[in-house]
Image: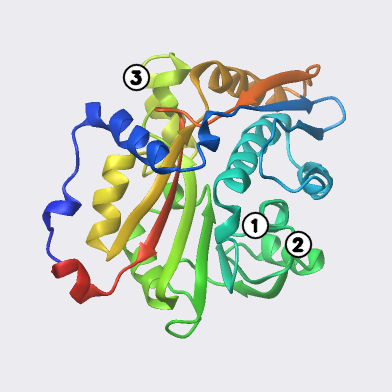
Amino acid sequence: MTPLDPRCREDDGQSASKHSQCYLRKNRHRKCTKELQVTVSFISNEVYYQFMKLTVKKNSHCNFNKSLGAFDQATILWRNIEVSLLKQKWSQHFKGKVLDLGCGEGEIANAVFEKQIEWGLDNDSEMINKAKRNHIYKIVLEADATKIPLKNGKVDLVFANSVLEHIPNIDLVFKEAYRVLKPGGQLIATMPSHKLVDYLSLGKLYGWWFNQKYHHFHLYNLSKWKRILCQYDFQLVDGYYYLDQPTIKLWHRLLWLNKLGIKTKQETVNARFLNLGAGVAIRAQKILKNKIRQ
C-alpha cells in the first residue's frame, strides 16, 4: 500500500455531492442531463426501454430481457437502471480482456457487454455451473476475488457489479485487481452507496439490521471510494450516483412483496445520473506506483 498522499484524503460528507457534480461537468458530451425512462412489466418479468436520445445500442434490450427473466421484480428494477446507465456512460470502455468479479450466472455481464467476454469468476459452485451453461464467458473460474487465479498484467478491465460491498477483506480484492490488470487497465464497479438505508426512512435500527441481513460491509460515498482506491494505487477517473429516494422506496416495497409471493403491476421510473443517490458507480485506472508517489 502506498503512503496516503493529499489526493487520497477523504473529503467531508457534504462535499460528496460537489465531487459528483465535478465528474458530471467533465463529461463534455453532457449526456448526463438526459433521463432514461424505464418501464418494468413486473407481471411478465420482462423489461422494456424507452431511450431518449441515448448512446445505447438499439437492440440492447433484447439481450437484457432474456437476462433478467430469472430475477425477482425488485432486482429487475435495480439492475435495469444500473445497467442502462452503465452502458450509456461507459460503453466505450467495455473493450479488451474483461474479468467479471462475482459473476454469478453471467446474466448482468450478458446485459452489459452484449458479447462473450474473457473471464467470469465466482466462489459459488452453483453459480459457476450456471455460468458455464450460459456460455457468456470464454473461461469460468471458481475462485475467490481475494485470490484471482490469473497471471500478472493479463486483464484490461475488471468489472464488479454489486460485489465489492459484500466482501469484508476488500483490501485483498483491490491488491489482486491491481496485480492482474495491465498498466493503465481499468476497474469499473457498482454498489449501493452510504445513502441506501437513509432513503428507506425506517430508522437506524432497521437500517443496521438490513445491512447485516444483506452483508453490506462497504457502503460509501464517492469521496471515500476515491481515498480507498488511491491507497491501492488506483486513480478514480469518473463516478456517479443513481437511484433516488422514491425509486429506493419502490424497490424496497417490491423486495418484501416478492418475498411474500406478491407481484405488482407495471411501473415506470426514471433512470438518471444524480448528484447524490443510493447507488454509486466508479471507474478507476491502475496507476504505476512511482507515478502516484510523485
Residue on which disc 3 sits: 204
Residue on which disc 2 sits: 130
211 or 88, which lies in front? 88
Location of residue 198 (image quadrant): top left
For image coordinates 42% across by 37% down, the residue present is 24
Q: Can the viewer see residue 102?
A: no
What's under tag 1, amino acid-wise?
Gly
Left or right: 192 with respect to 124? Answer: left
Dot 1: what SS? loop
Residue on which disc 1 sits: 104
Q: Residue reaching furthest right?
A: 44
Dot 3 or dot 2: first in sequence order is 2
What's under tag 3, amino acid-wise?
Lys
71 versus 136 height, above or below: above
Mark whose residue sits in front, 1 or 3: 1
Dot 3: what SS? helix
Residues tagged 2 and 1 counted as in contact (Cβ below 8 A) = yes
Residue 218 x, y percent position in the rendering: 36, 44
Mark 3 to mark 2: distance in Å? 37 Å
Dot 2: what SS? helix
Dot 2 or dot 1: first in sequence order is 1
Q: Can the viewer see residue 144?
A: yes
For image coordinates 55% across by 37% down, the residue present is 31
Instruction: Residue 196: give its label.
Output: none
Residue 149 x, y percent position in the rendering: 50, 80
Label 3 neighbour load within 10 Å: few <14, some 14-19, many 20+: few
291 or 12, which lies in front? 291
What's under tag 2, amino acid-wise?
Lys
230 or 170, which lies in front? 230
Residue 278 x, y percent position in the rendering: 46, 29
50 or 162, which lies in front? 50
